[in-house]
Amino acid sequence: MDKVKIHPWILLTLLFSSISMGLYAYRNFSSGETGYGMVFVLLCMFMLGLVLYGFVRNRRLGDGGTEGS
C-alpha cells in the first residue's frame, strides 16, 4: 500500500493549535493555575511533535525514499 503525504494545511492548523495551546498555558501559569498550565504545555509539546513528524515524513516521501519501512 502506498504511503500518502500529510496535507500541508493540516500541518499548518496543527502548528496554529500548538501555538494557541502554548499561549493558553502561559495565561494559566500567570494566573496561578499550575495544573492547567502543565496540561496545556504537554498538549503544546505533543502537537509540535506531530507537526515535526509530519514535516519529516512529507520530506522523506517527497524525496522518493522509503527508509525505515
Image: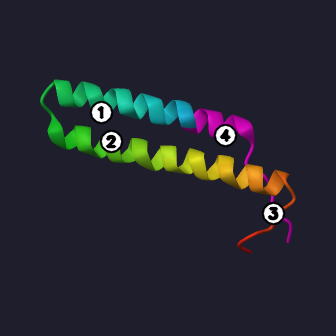
Q: How far apart are marks 4 and 3 (CA)?
A: 16 Å
> Which circle marks residue 41 in the picture?
2
- Mark 1 lies on a secondary structure that is helix
Label 4 environment density (alpha carbons within 10 Å; few <14, some 14–19, many ≥20) = few
Asked if disc 4 and disc 3 are in contact, CB closer than 8 Å, the reply is no
Q: Earlier in the sequence, mark 3 or mark 1?
A: 3
Q: How far apart are marks 4 and 1 (CA)?
A: 22 Å
Asked if disc 2 and disc 1 are in contact, CB closer than 8 Å, the reply is yes
Please give the residue where the numbered disc 4 appears in the rendered image: 10
Q: Is residue 53 above or below residue 16?
A: below
Q: Which of marks 3 and 2 is nearer the N terminus?
A: 3
The residue range painted magenta reads 1-14
Q: Distance between the residues labelled 4 and 2?
A: 21 Å
> Which circle marks residue 3 in the picture?
3
- Amino acid carrying mark 1 in the image: Ala
Q: How far apart are marks 2 and 1 (CA)?
A: 6 Å
- Mark 2 lies on a secondary structure that is helix
Please identify the residue farthest to the left as the structure is shown.
32
Asked if disc 3 and disc 1 are in contact, CB closer than 8 Å, the reply is no
Please give the residue where the numbered disc 1 appears in the rendered image: 25
- Amino acid carrying mark 4 in the image: Ile
Q: Distance between the residues labelled 3 and 2?
A: 31 Å
